[in-house]
Image (cartoon, rainbow, N blue to C red):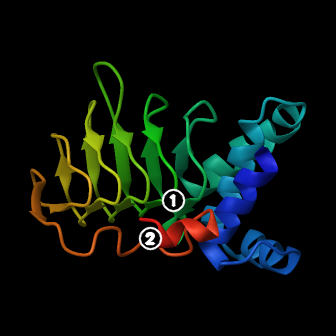
Amino acid sequence: MVIQLIKSDLYRYSGRTDWRAFLRHYLCNRGFRFTFWLRLASATSTWRKLAYPMYVWQKHRSGIIISPRTPIGYGLYIGHGGPLIINSSAQLGENINLSPYTVIGANNGPAARIGNNVYIGPNCNLIENVHIGNNATIGAGSVVTKNIPANATAAGNYAKVLNYHQPAQFIHNRWPPMAADKT
């Protein structure tokens, strides 16, 4: 399963899952490199113990703070290599785009639940137990304190739904590859 998660993340970055794409993105893309070690550190096998020191090193080096205990679906994409902070109680669906300076946090109870095919723009804050529906887009600089419905584009401080045009338009190279035609 860990190999499939890594392949799905690689596919989100490059549209391919071959070794050349892996080497290129591992060597040149801080977001993918962090995601690779995060996936291995969250494995339920021996890989966890072997990968955890590299995960910690990558976390400090990249400024990306995501716990290996955070449930994350297939196809995680971290734009521009972070930095970002995700509370360990958050739940991230499949084909999620996280932009730099994003914070998904909570002081009381669980953090946000994010659906599939969601784009979160730069410098966004998702506060407490909000639910972001499938195919949603959260605009840059937004502060999300209330639920955002599926297929909505929301932005602002405090985020409000702006429209329902072109849901999930910024989610490219969806995993699995055939799923792009179904949403």
Q: Tell me if residue 129 comes above or below residue 151 in the rendering.
A: above
Q: Mark 2 or mark 1: which comes first in sequence?
A: 1
| Picture quadrant where residue 183 is located | bottom left
Q: Is residue 172 left or right of residue 166?
A: right
Q: Nearer the viewer, residue 100 or 93?
A: 93
Q: Which residue, as the protein is rendered here, is positioned at the far front?
A: 182
Per the image, label 1 sits on a secondary structure element best described as loop
Crowd tier of the residue under label 1, counting other residues whose Cα lies within 10 Å: few below 14, some 14–19, many 20 or above: many
Q: Position of residue 129 (x, y in %)?
A: 28, 30
Query: Which mark, by number, is residue 147?
Result: none
Q: Tell me if residue 60 comes above or below residue 153 in the rendering.
A: above
Q: Tell me if residue 66 comes above or below residue 152 in the rendering.
A: above
Amino acid bearing label 2: Ile
Q: Position of residue 118 (x, y in %)?
A: 38, 58
Where is mark 2, residue-wise?
Answer: 171
Tag 2 near tag 1, CB within 8 Å? yes
Q: Is residue 66 left or right of residue 7?
A: left
- The number of numbered discs placed on residues in the rendered structure image is 2
| Picture quadrant where residue 91 is located | top left
Quadrant of the image containing the N terminus: top right
Crowd tier of the residue under label 2, counting other residues whose Cα lies within 10 Å: few below 14, some 14–19, many 20 or above: many
Query: Which mark, by number, is residue 95?
Result: 1
